[in-house]
Amino acid sequence: MMKVAVIGCGAAGLYSAILLKKNNREYEVTVFEKEEKLAKKVYATGNGHCNVLNKKLLANKYNNIPYFKNLLKDFSYASLKEELSSWGVMLLENGDYVYPLSFSASSFVSYLLSYGEKLGVRFLPAKKVSDYEKTQDGYQICDQIFDKVVIATGAKSSPNLGSDGSFLSVLRRHGYQWNEFKPGLAPIRVAENVKSLQGIRHHALVKASSDKKQIFEEEGEVLFKKDGLSGIVIFNAESALFREKTLISPKITIDLFPEHSFYSLCDKLNQAKIKNPEYYLSSFLVSALADYVTKEAKNKNVDQIAQTLKHLTFSVTGSYGFEDSRVSLGGIPLNEVTPFLESKKESGVYFVGEILDADGYCGGYNLSWALISAILVSKHV
Ligand SMILES: Cc1cc2nc3c(=O)[nH]c(=O)nc-3n(C[C@H](O)[C@H](O)[C@H](O)COP(=O)(O)OP(=O)(O)OC[C@H]3O[C@@H](n4cnc5c(N)ncnc54)[C@H](O)[C@@H]3O)c2cc1C
């Protein structure tokens, strides 16, 4: 009988275990998880709602566009939805974002764990794997021998939710190298004093640049923090910036009124200024942001104010780090594994999820990758 060990019970490990057991009832599938709580990170996803898939599933939302362009020829939103539906998971579509029908991450986890148990998956919580060793009969993990091993230990983001990068020392002993891990999908620290803006939310067009070259553009809600910027669009911008090998004078430029051209904005500002010359900007923006823009503008004429409103620029000093990051950039390079994610170094060892160098933007792209990688592995093991 084929014995499979899955190391790590995050989304990717849990999906893998379910798929392996569902497709091969005769397999013995054991999941080792170092935390007492299984799938701890999934509870926190999508603000507790779990944005499980994305309807568009676009390759250009991932770090490695050629790889995903090729991969997504075999996977579509419809095929992933069908897979989840075959487990009894019902979905709720909200624009392109897709959630479990319950709109509850914790109900989703409870459902998956009970479904896994029903299939016969053996879950071992609070069981940290400190190594795996090749023997004549397979791989030894905690005194048991397995034919195949699926490594689903995640990376370094949000270490309070389990994945703290501690398994990397094991992989190093096995001769693996990886692309440096960096925090992705995180708030950004800026050099400017934005304390007065803390808590303000504003819909804007956000551009990110390095060495004066634009590398990102997207509309969304920016949330000002006491020393930086946050919000989904900023998380995506942060990933785009920190995916770069070298960053030179990285900047975030915000167009506070993307729906207006510079000239139509000037027009509107002039109209308001006639009515209330001193406070006209407060008719466009929350007062604290209006004051900030007025200070930033080189002079106070309407052209300069409009220019600043369309190009409010911040110097990026860094990311908020792994503690505040939703995904890790970097990982085991995809060219170190076969198309079915089996290690090229150790036969019978597979990788799934965030430990691989594959990451996406917000909107369900990372949980989609967890599912796709689990499907790939389950087809081969
Ligand atoms: C706050 C937050 C919200 C998010 N929201 C979304 C969202 O809505 N949609 C989306 O697509 N993505 C979201 N993400 C990203 C997504 O959750 C992750 O990319 C995905 O869960 C990664 O799954 P994984 O299984 O690869 O890794 P992880 O979830 O990190 O799981 C790895 C598991 O392995 C365990 N482990 C590590 N080492 C060992 C060991 N030695 N022995 C045993 N077990 C070990 C860890 O404890 C952990 O449970 C969010 C992330 C965060 C932090």
Image (tube, grey):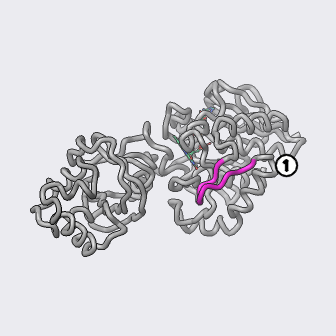
**Residue 98 part of the magenta-drawn span:** yes
Identified by mark 1, the residue type is Asn
User: Is 46 placed above or below 32 here?
Assistant: below
- Residue 301 quadrant: bottom left
Residue 136 percent coordinates (x, y): 78, 38
Q: Is residue 1 left or right of residue 292?
A: right
Q: Which residues are magenta?
A: 90-99
Mark 1 Cα within 10 Å, few/some/many (few <14, many 20+)?
few
Residue 25 percent coordinates (x, y): 88, 43
User: Is 134 placed above or below 75 here?
Assistant: above
Name which residue lies at 63% across and 39% down: 105
Q: Residue furthest left?
A: 299
So how many labels did they put on this image? 1
Q: Residue furthest bottom?
A: 263
Under 8 Å from ligand 1: the CB of mark 1? no
Name which residue lies at 38% across and 57% down: 203
Quadrant of ligand 1 in image:
top right
The residue singled out by tag 1 in the image is 23
Q: Secondary structure at mark 1?
A: helix
Q: Main secondary structure of the magenta part?
A: strand
